[in-house]
Image (cartoon, helix red, strand yellow):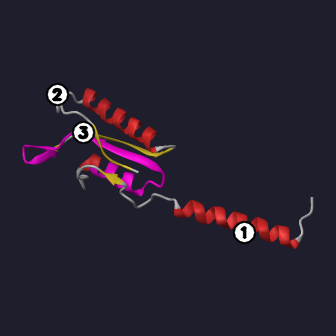
Amino acid sequence: MSYTAQQADGLAYAASAKKKQASSTSLAGKKGNVRRRLPRGHRECGKAVEDYIKASGHSAYASTPMYALNNSWSYICGSALNRRSIKEAEALALRACENGTRKWKNAFGGKCSIYASK
């Protein structure tokens, strides 16, 4: 199959338009819908928040309420990154957080909730 110059230009334009559209819809660097204050620098959960913000697709961060214990913050968190939809990301983040509460059930008995999603 051969293409004329005009057809080739049209294909190049379509490819560049798709590339621009994909880059303009990236969620990387955005916090999205923040429902509660996000922790920063608190070990694993702080890293989970940083990864959530860096994620380019639909993502969510869930956590139990934060409380002070022996001069430090204590809570359990979960996240889901780069999923097909916000709904899927939120469900998986809640599941990850709830699994953590079962694993460390003696550490904290609070309920997991979505802190942020995009």
- Find residue 92 and name its label: none
Determine contact: label 2, label 1, CB under 8 Å. no
Location of residue 113 in the rendering, given as x and y in whole percent from the top left corner: 27, 39
Residue that sits furthest to the left in the current view: 70
Q: Amino acid at mark 2?
A: Asn
Q: Identify the residue position indicated by label 3 in the image.
A: 76
Q: What residue is drawn where x is 40% and y is 36%?
A: 92
Q: Is 3 inside the magenta-drawn segment?
A: no
Pointer 3 local density, CA inside 10 Å: few below 14, some 14–19, many at least 20: many
Name the quadrant containing residue 114: top left
Q: What residue is drawn where x is 27% and y is 26%?
A: 102
Q: Determine whether, in the image, residue 91 is placed left or right of residue 115.
A: right
Location of residue 67 in the rendering, given as x and y in whole percent from the top left corner: 13, 43
Q: Which is more toward the observer, 12 or 96?
A: 12
Q: Closer to the N terminus: mark 2 or mark 1?
A: 1
Dot 1: element: helix
Dot 2: element: loop
Q: Identify the residue position indicated by label 1 in the image.
A: 13
Q: Amino acid at mark 3?
A: Ile
Q: Amino acid at mark 1?
A: Tyr
What is the span of residues highlighted in magenta in the rendered image?
A: 46-73
Q: CA distance from mark 1 to mark 3?
A: 48 Å
Q: Determine whether, in the image, residue 110 is placed left or right of residue 96.
A: left
Q: Identify the residue position indicated by label 2 in the image.
A: 106
Against 15, is 104 above or below?
above
